[in-house]
Amino acid sequence: MLVGVLVLESAAVLADPANAGTPTPEEEFRRGRELFEGKFDLQGRIRTHVADLPPEVVRCGNCHAVADGPEVPRSLAPRLTHELLIKRRSRRGGPASNYDRSSFCALLRDGFDPAHVLISVEMPRYTLADGECAALWRYLTGSGGNETEPH
């Protein structure tokens, strides 16, 4: 019986993409696009709420357009491009700053931009694994690390 349980647990670990080792850049990019588009559920809530919102409400693509994607009707959210994220610029009245993967993930989780300026309360704060953040970063910027200049 114990052997059967161990076999089942091992199969579950192998079937879990999070345990499949380091993804290739192409796999990470694809995963980021799928997360952005809502093909995988994200967990997020509005800063002033006590409960998570339904996954279909917190999809990135509900509000943000990507570099080569169509506009999102009636959205005030910025188009997420490599240049917007990487280029040093003043954001929301704060000092000039730029994102790297770490500050991007901090923004998604805590709601503060790289200059520690609080983003809009309407933007959900997400519960994301490091791999999910890295995948979103790769998809939006085309880079995998903490690059700070466009390529």
Image (cartoon, rainbow, N blue to C red):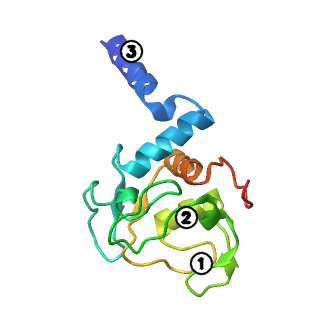
Q: Which residue is drawn at 59% across and 87% down?
A: 93
- Residue depth check, mark 3 versus mark 2: number of the one nearer the observer: 2
Give how far apart the Cα atoms at labels 1 and 3 are. 47 Å
Mark 1, residue position: 116
Q: Name the residue tied to disc 3.
A: 7
Q: Quadrant of the N terminus?
A: top left
For numbered disc 2, what is the local secondary structure?
helix
Element carrying mark 3: helix
Q: Looking at the picture, how far across and down is residue 85, in whole percent?
A: 61, 64
Image quadrant where residue 56 sits: bottom left
- Closer to the chain start, of discs 2 and 1, is 2
Above or below, comparing residue 10 to residue 50 in the picture: above
Residue in the foreground of this view, choosing between 5 and 39? 39
The answer to which quarter of the image holds residue 92 is bottom right
Residue type at mark 3 is: Val
The kind of residue on which mark 1 rests is His
Neighbour tally class for label 3: few under 14, some 14-19, many 20 plus, Cα within 10 Å: few
- Between 65 and 93, the residue placed more toward the observer is 65
Q: How far apart are marks 3 and 2 (CA)?
A: 37 Å
Q: Residue 38: x and y, percent? A: 35, 49
Residue at the (48%, 70%) spot, across then down: 78
Q: Residues within 10 Å of mark 2 (few under 14, many from 20)?
A: some
Q: Nearer the viewer, residue 92 or 19?
A: 92
Query: Which disc number belongs to residue 106?
Result: 2
